[in-house]
Image (tube, rainbow, N blue to C red):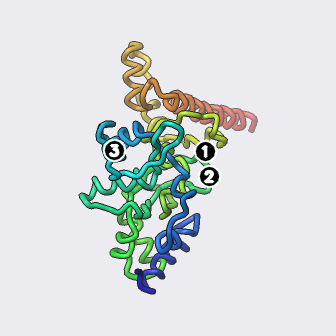
Amino acid sequence: MLTESQRKVLLGVQETSSRYFNLEDFIVNEMPVQVRNNDLYTLEEVAKVTSMSIVTIRQYVRNRKLDAIKQWKNWMVPSNELARLLYSRMHGVSLPVSEVMLVVVDAELYEEDSPINQYQLVTASDLLKNIQADGWEEIERYIKSVMPKDHGPTLYVEAISNIKDFFRRSGEVIYNDFEQIESPLHIFIPENKKISKLIKNNVHPFLEETPAEALKTIKEHFGDLENPQTILNVYKTLLDMTEIAVEIEHSGRGNRDD
């Protein structure tokens, strides 16, 4: 049972740092099943994200250490459960199945399918232990303390179940169906200035690479060569650099016209 002051802290976090405005309700009351099961992952995907063997994950489901639901013939794990397992392994603690997992997330949540740039899993206990008042300054101090300094301008605190395709948007699980993504490419894959700078600074050495060396470079900087996401990443970088070149060309023409 939470005290009145603790509920005020949760409401303060919800009002200042949440898009979905249901954080306090989920923690105080039970999270609706339709929300908890909104974002599901196969046992193989859970094994990949957690770096555990598929045999161990199956044992966890069989022994009810990991909550899963049956869809046709497949066991599927909600994102809240996957986050609970990750947090438990990271901190060496045991959390109940009923635990509502929260996340401090660096992303633009008002854009559907936008990438999760980085995140930190937290619990309600973490919030209540580290936030001493419900004022926005105290809340902001804590949020920034758990996130690395090189984050974007907007950080949110959310129930992870609210964020559809969380572990796909974070890049830890491969999208199986790009047909479901309706966001334009510039939203789904934001400009990677670090990669663009790398290419600009190494364009001549890269051109001298053999095909085998080039494939190694692509894998190192863009991702798995068998992943369609890698193709999109390369294509998006090509478009970004072409857009810059076109802007420079137009700017040069404008100067000549003057």
Q: Which mark is residue 50?
A: 3
Q: Nearer the viewer, residue 1 or 130?
A: 1
For label 1, the residue is 187
Q: Which mark is residue 111?
A: 2
Locate the N terminus and report the quarter of the image it occupies.
bottom left
Q: Which mark is residue 123?
A: none
Tell me which amino acid carries mark 2: Glu
Calculate the distance from the C-alpha at mark 1 to the C-alpha at mark 3: 27 Å
Vertical arrangement, residue 134 with respect to residue 181, above or below: below
Using residue 48 as the reference point, say whether residue 189 is left or right of it.
right
Quadrant of the rendered structure where residue 110 is?
bottom right
Residue 129: % across, % down: 33, 75
Tell me which amino acid carries mark 3: Thr
Going from N to C along the chain, the mark reached first, 1 or 3, is: 3
Residue 224: % across, % down: 42, 28
Tell me which amino acid carries mark 1: Ile
Residue beneath the point at 35% across and 40% down: 47
**CB contact under 8 Å: marks 1 and 2:** yes
Query: Callout 2: helix, strand or loop?
Result: loop
Query: Callout 3: helix, strand or loop?
Result: helix
Residue beneath the point at 38% across and 15% down: 212
